[in-house]
């Protein structure tokens, strides 16, 4: 073969060898699996997580960490079996290596272990139950929201600081609900005069109202997320309890959507959160401005903020190591060494890859436009982690 033929063959071989890498890197976007609850009373929670995540991508011209990104969204319908099946298809049929979006702890318990067992990454943008924070912690499991107990602990701390001596507790009868109640007790030192557990699809809370009236507590703590919280607060006011027994809740039970839906029934309720739309830091201001530009007067919830932060976390890791998208170990190393921006301000992981963060007191007030707004009034807990981190034996990065 002449030299020109040899050179031509060599160049052709080189081109063909390089082509898949170029095609994958330059033309095919990184797919991220977002499994969430988009239907039913809690559907707006998943919608906000989805839209917050996508907003961060849109702000970066369709990219995260410089990589073209496509979000593959599926509705789990708040059914653990659905989520498990969806995750399996995304793993086997689409080769997805980064997942996020699950709202409820019982759904996460069904799907997340399969994701991790298949050498993929899961980033929680909401629920983060105790087992994943402690003995079952995993190097490819990250949380951009909180460890669940922080919600109840901060509410308990606020109720304690407000001087209440007795409390009645209400939560759904599933793992996260029970964890929330125990977390509240951890920081509230007064007497628990009663507690009751409801179902995740409950719409009538008359029995709970009667129990509260009979127990005569000084304060009620209820954890009823999404549409459940709307129904509970409306019925609480209609039962005449709001004027007699104040409430201290976490923002899972009273967010911006809930506040606008129930109006005056929310006014005066004290709550806690790790984020609010009035936070004064550059990342949050950019997020709030972008949300309002895209969605107008649609309320901005902490669910949207957590979805946005989850996307920023992915972007920070990919910016640190662009090749880590398909390598969970490399992705973990990149994320843990990156400066991760957050709508909350400074962001830091604990040893179990859950946030260490401040918790704030908020209050529902009537704004100048007549709508109910949540106003930040102070700080409840500073640099707060979780008690399960000590049980986590994570391999070194």
Image (cartoon, rainbow, N blue to C red):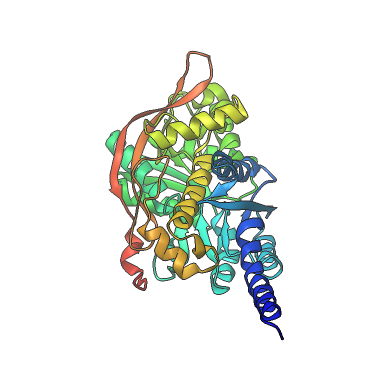
- Return the x and y of residue 233 as percentages of the image width and height: 54, 33
Name above or below for residue 147 compared with residue 297: below
Name above or below for residue 305 compared with residue 372: below
Q: Give the quadrant of residue 99.
A: bottom right
Q: Residue at x 42, y 51 (%)?
A: 146
Q: Which image quarter is the N terminus in?
A: bottom right
285 and 21: which is toward the camera: 21
Name the side, left or right, on which 378 lies relative to 5.
Answer: left
340 and 25: which is toward the camera: 25
Q: Residue at x 60, y 65 (%)?
A: 110
How many numbered circles are shown?
A: 0
Q: Which image quarter is the C terminus in?
A: bottom left
Q: Give the quadrant of residue 182.
A: bottom left
Residue 216 can be seen in this image? no
Name above or below for residue 94 compared with residue 17: above
Name the side, left or right, on which 273 lies relative to 95.
Answer: left
Name above or below for residue 251 compared with residue 4: above
- Return the x and y of residue 372 as percentages of the image width and height: 51, 22
- Return the x and y of residue 186 as percentages of the image width and height: 32, 52
Residue 263 can be seen in this image? yes
16 and 305: which is toward the camera: 16
Q: Residue at x 53, y 61 (%)?
A: 122
- Return the x and y of residue 340 as percentages of the image width and height: 40, 50
Q: Residue at x 30, y 66 (%)?
A: 390
């Amino acid at each position: 073969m002449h030299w020109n033929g040899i050179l031509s063959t060599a160049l052709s071989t080189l081109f063909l060898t390089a082509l898949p890498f170029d095609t994958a890197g330059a033309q095919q976007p990184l797919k991220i699996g977002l499994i969430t609850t988009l239907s039913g009373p809690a559907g707006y929670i998943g919608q906000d997580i989805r839209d917050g995540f996508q907003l961060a991508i849109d702000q970066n011209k369709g990219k995260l960490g410089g990589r073209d990104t496509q979000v593959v969204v599926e509705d789990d319908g708040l059914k653990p079996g659905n989520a498990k099946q969806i995750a399996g298809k995304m793993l086997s049929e689409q080769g997805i290596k980064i997942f996020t979006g699950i709202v409820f702890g019982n759904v996460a318990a069904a799907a997340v272990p399969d994701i991790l067992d298949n050498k993929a990454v899961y980033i929680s943008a909401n629920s983060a139950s105790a087992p994943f924070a402690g003995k079952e912690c995993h190097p490819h499991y990250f949380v951009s929201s909180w460890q669940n107990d922080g919600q109840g602990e901060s509410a308990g701390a606020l109720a304690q600081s407000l001087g209440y001596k007795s409390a009645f507790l209400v939560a759904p009868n599933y793992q996260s609900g029970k964890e929330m109640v125990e977390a509240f007790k951890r920081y509230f030192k007064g007497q628990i005069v009663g507690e009751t557990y409801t179902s995740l699809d409950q719409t009538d809370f008359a029995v709970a109202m009667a129990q509260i009236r009979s127990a005569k507590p000084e304060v009620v703590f209820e954890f009823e997320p999404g549409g459940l919280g709307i129904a509970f607060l409306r019925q609480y006011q209609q039962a005449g309890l709001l004027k007699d027994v104040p409430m201290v809740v976490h923002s899972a039970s009273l967010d911006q959507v809930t506040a606008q839906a129930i109006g005056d029934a929310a006014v005066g309720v004290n709550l806690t959160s790790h984020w609010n739309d009035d936070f004064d830091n550059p990342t949050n201001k950019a997020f709030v401005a972008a949300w309002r530009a895209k969605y107008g007067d649609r309320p901005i919830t902490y669910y949207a903020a957590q979805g946005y932060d989850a996307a920023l976390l992915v972007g920070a890791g990919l910016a640190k190591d662009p090749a880590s998208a398909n390598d969970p170990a490399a992705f973990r190393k990149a994320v843990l060494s990156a400066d991760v921006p957050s709508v909350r301000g400074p962001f830091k992981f604990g040893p179990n890859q859950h946030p260490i963060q401040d918790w704030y007191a908020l209050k529902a007030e009537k704004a100048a436009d007549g709508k109910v707004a949540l106003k930040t009034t102070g700080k409840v807990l500073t640099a707060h982690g979780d008690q399960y981190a000590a049980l986590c034996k994570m391999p070194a990065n």
